[in-house]
């Protein structure tokens, strides 16, 4: 059942729908079962993808559109940040955690019989949706900002999606996509409840990889909030099934230069604060007005978590620290280790706590950006 988060109207899942008639966002109620014996067997049978959790997903495995996503490594690493586990979600088919969400979302688009969809994204989501639509034989039309990086647009185009570059802000891109969606189905990942159900497998994998225990805290970047909402949903499902007793604290990280949610958190507000977005190297989370802002703030509160902002210098520093130990991540992803370093310095994390840092995206699509950043540094800039 699809349920409106605004007016509580409900809709059956048989027909394509991306929002409520009132304009509200939809959530998806769907049963989640966990069979430990089956999971152990699937792990030992090398079923190394997220579909081993099919009993907890809204799409049956027979309908899965898959590129082998999920089951990414969880690496324990000690360093400037103390002890922590790093979840290498950049090791996904298209190089970002977005594949968790796209796999489940595009599987549902396919079940709905859609042959053509519209999506808007400046980067990883567009790449991921383009790849899964290619796999599913669905024509994807992706709206991107005119200044989107070539590492991402080239990949979108090569997957066969139609690319529409739009001049103006990210909000202008969304408006153009919504306008086009009057004729074709809008499959925006930031709206889709199926996308969140895909991302929740991150919580399941952390639990499984920590020997069927939840960590004490999970640090994630937040832009549109699919990681926060996905982790909150996934850990809640595990708790409701009696698999864990309490939710890990979600530590949600934004770039100080675009922090509508962190600012709201500091001011005890339950909706995002309007911000003037400045340029940040964390372009993947530079979302000035997250659609599900209220739900994201509520999710962090529910887990007893917190919001953290990081400055550009802290992001760049963390990017370099990660690379020096062999992990080439994209600048957006560096906000999570940057937050851990900062929280440790401030003594805000119990040294005995088990902490997971989610590494969301590969550096390979951002090499152009990264080399510009290095060039600016050599030239004496930031
Ligand atoms: C999309 C993205 C994020 C943020 O995820 P949201 O669901 O928008 O909060 C973080 N890192 C990378 C690399 C991304 O592509
Ligand atoms: Zn509604």
Image (cartoon, rainbow, N blue to C red):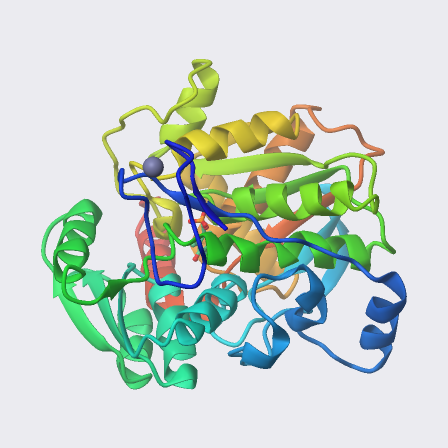
Q: Taking 224 as reference, is 279 left or right?
A: left
Q: Taking 180 as reference, is 326 left or right?
A: right
What x and y, as percent, mark residue 178?
18, 54
Q: How many marks?
A: 0
Q: Nearer the viewer, residue 222 or 310?
A: 222
What x and y, as percent, mark residue 243?
83, 47
What residue is rendered at 32% in x and 70% in y? 152
Q: In this rendering, does residue 290 appear at all?
A: no
Kindly indicate the quadrant of the structure image that contains residue 346.
top right
Q: In this rendering, does residue 168 appear at all?
A: yes
What x and y, as percent, mark residue 380?
32, 46
What residue is rendered at 47% in x and 42% in y? 222
Extreme left residue here?
167
Q: Nearer the viewer, residue 81 or 221?
A: 221
Q: Nearer the viewer, residue 305 or 344?
A: 305
From what the image shows, is residue 292 above or below residue 376?
above
Q: Taking 30 as reference, is 9 left or right?
A: left
From what the image shows, is residue 107 above or below residue 249?
below
From what the image shows, is residue 96 above or below residue 41?
above
Kindly indicate the quadrant of the structure image that contains residue 304.
top right
Q: Taking 109 as reference, is 344 left or right?
A: right
Q: Quadrant of the C terminus?
A: top left
What x and y, as percent, mark residue 379?
30, 52
Extreme top residue here?
267
What residue is rendered at 61% in x and 60% in y? 324
What residue is rendered at 47% in x and 21% in y? 265
């Amino acid at each position: 059942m699809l349920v409106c988060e605004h007016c509580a109207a409900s809709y059956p899942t048989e027909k394509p729908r991306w929002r409520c008639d009132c304009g509200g966002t939809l959530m998806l109620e769907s049963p989640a079962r966990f069979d430990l014996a089956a999971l152990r067997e699937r792990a030992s049978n090398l079923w190394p993808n997220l579909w081993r959790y099919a009993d907890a997903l809204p799409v049956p495995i027979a309908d899965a559109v898959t590129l082998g996503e999920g089951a990414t490594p969880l690496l324990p690493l000690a360093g400037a940040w103390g002890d922590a586990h790093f979840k290498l979600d950049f090791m996904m088919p298209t190089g970002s955690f977005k594949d968790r969400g796209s796999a489940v979302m595009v599987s549902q688009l396919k079940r709905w019989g859609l042959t053509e969809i519209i999506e808007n994204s400046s980067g990883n989501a567009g790449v991921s949706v383009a790849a899964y639509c290619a796999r599913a034989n669905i024509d994807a039309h992706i709206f991107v900002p005119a200044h989107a990086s070539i590492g991402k647009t080239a990949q979108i185009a090569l997957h066969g999606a139609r690319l529409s570059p739009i001049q103006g802000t990210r909000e202008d891109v969304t408006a153009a996509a919504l306008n086009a969606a009057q004729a074709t189905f809008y499959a925006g990942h930031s709206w889709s409840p199926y996308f969140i159900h895909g991302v929740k497998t991150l919580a399941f994998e952390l639990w499984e990889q920590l020997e069927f225990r939840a960590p004490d805290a999970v640090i994630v970047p937040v832009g549109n909030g699919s990681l926060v909402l996905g982790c909150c949903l996934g850990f809640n499902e595990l708790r409701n099934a009696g698999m864990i007793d309490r939710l890990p604290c979600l530590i949600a990280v934004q770039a100080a230069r675009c922090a509508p949610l962190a600012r709201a958190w500091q001011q005890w507000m339950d909706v995002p604060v309007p911000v003037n977005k400045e340029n940040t190297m964390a372009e993947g989370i530079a979302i000035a007005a997250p659609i599900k802002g209220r739900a994201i703030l509520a999710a962090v509160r529910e887990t007893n978590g917190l919001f953290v902002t990081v400055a550009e210098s802290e992001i760049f520093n963390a990017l370099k620290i990660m690379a020096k130990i062999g992990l080439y991540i994209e600048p957006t992803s560096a906000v999570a280790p940057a937050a851990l370093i900062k929280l440790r310095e401030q003594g805000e994390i119990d040294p005995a706590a088990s902490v997971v840092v989610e590494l969301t995206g590969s550096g390979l699509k951002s090499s152009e950006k990264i080399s510009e950043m290095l060039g600016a540094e050599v030239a004496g800039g930031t």
